[in-house]
Structures are given as C-alpha cells and as structure tokens.
C-alpha cells in the first residue's frame, strides 16, 4: 500500500514486456526463413495467447494486491502463460538449430528453458523477467545482422 503507484507501474510493465516479446516472435515468424516452418507461427501465437492470459493475473494483482499477497488469485493463467512461453521458446531454440541462425543461439535458448522448466517443477514458481533475459541473444542476433 505504501508504494501503490510503483506496484501498478510494475504490473503494467510485466504485461507490456510479455506482449511485446511475444509479438516480436510473431513478427519473426512471418519475416524470417524459420517462418516457413508452421511451428514458428504456432509457437509465437501460443506465446502471445499466454501473454494475454498473464494479463489476467496482472489485472488481478493491480486491483487486489492484498489478494495476490495472500495467494488467493487463480494460478492457472500464470501457469498457462509460463508453459506456453517455455514451449514457444523451446520451439524457437530448435528452429534456430535447424535454420539460418547461429547454432549457439539455439543452445543459448534451449539450455536455459530446460533449466527453468526444472526450476519451475521444483519451486512451483518462476519470475517472468527470465524470459526477457533469454530472448536477449535473439534480439542481439537480429539487430546485428546486416540487411
């Protein structure tokens, strides 16, 4: 309650980050050679649907911080978001290994996702910012390529 504005700002930031990240993969699926694989679009749109479900939790968190702290909000939207995002990134990691991307990018995506999946199983939670960190090498590769 003491930092309500900061709390609201962080919830909007989480939501915006998830939608922008998933939307970036939707654009990548339509723009790159990996997009010729139907899994690219399926994985990307799955991530976008997950991000929108994550938005349900974020609205609840923004409007009922006490309920969030007490653990009374439904967990399924966050879990679906987490699983769709992990699956989507795993598919992209595999596509990186199959396509015109550097091989290291595939492993730099797959290894952290598998590791985070194991962390999720044991801790039953996952901080959402980890997905943005995992996508940083993708952003770097895409922006470092010459047109």
Image (cartoon, rainbow, N blue to C red):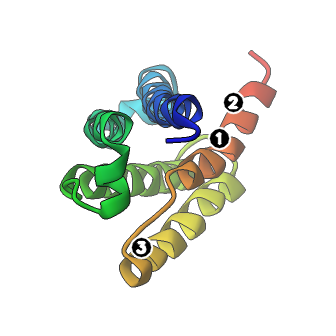
Name the residue located 28 percent from the left edge and 39 percent from the top edge. 60
Name the residue located 38 percent from the left edge and 31 percent from the top edge. 36
Name the residue located 48 percent from the left edge and 72 percent from the top edge. 114
Mark 1 element type? helix
Between the residue at mark 2 and the residue at mark 3, the CA separation in whole angstroms equals 29 Å
Q: Is residue 99 above or below residue 80?
A: above
Q: Position of residue 137 (x, y in %)?
A: 71, 45
Between the residue at mark 3 and the residue at mark 1, the CA separation in whole angstroms equals 23 Å
Picture quadrant where residue 64 is located: top left
Identity of the residue furthest to the bottom in this view: 122
Q: Is residue 30 above or below residue 99?
A: above
Task: Tell me whether circle 2 and circle 3 mark residues in contact (CB < 8 Å).
Answer: no
Picture quadrant where residue 109 is located: bottom right
Mark 3 element type? helix
Q: Residues within 10 Å of mark 1 (few under 14, many from 20)?
A: many
Instruction: Give the number of the disc on residue 142.
Output: 2
Q: Is residue 111 left or right of residue 42?
A: right
Q: Which residue is mark 3?
A: 120
Q: Which residue is mark 1?
A: 138
Q: Position of residue 63 (x, y in %)?
A: 31, 34
Q: Please report whichever mark, 3 or 1, sits nearer to the chain's N-terminal start.
A: 3
Between the residue at mark 2 and the residue at mark 1, the CA separation in whole angstroms equals 6 Å
Task: Tell me whether circle 2 and circle 1 mark residues in contact (CB < 8 Å).
Answer: yes
- Where does the C terminus fall, quadrant-wise? top right
Identity of the residue furthest to the top in this view: 147
Q: Is residue 97 among the parts visible in the rendering?
A: yes
Mark 2 element type? helix
Instruction: Give the number of the disc on residue 52.
Output: none
């Amino acid at each position: 309650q003491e930092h309500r504005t900061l709390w609201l700002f962080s919830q909007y930031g989480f939501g915006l980050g998830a939608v922008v990240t998933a939307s970036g993969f939707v654009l990548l699926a339509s723009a790159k050679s990996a997009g010729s694989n139907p899994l690219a679009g399926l994985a990307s749109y799955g991530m976008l649907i997950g991000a929108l479900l994550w938005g349900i939790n974020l609205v609840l968190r923004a409007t009922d911080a006490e309920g969030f702290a007490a653990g009374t909000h439904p967990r399924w939207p966050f879990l679906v978001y987490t699983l769709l995002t992990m699956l989507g990134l795993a598919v992209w990691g595999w596509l990186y290994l199959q396509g015109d991307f550097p091989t290291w990018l595939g492993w730099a995506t797959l290894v952290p996702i598998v590791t985070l999946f194991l962390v999720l199983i044991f801790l039953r939670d996952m901080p959402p910012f980890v997905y943005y960190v995992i996508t940083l090498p993708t952003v770097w590769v895409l922006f470092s390529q010459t047109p």
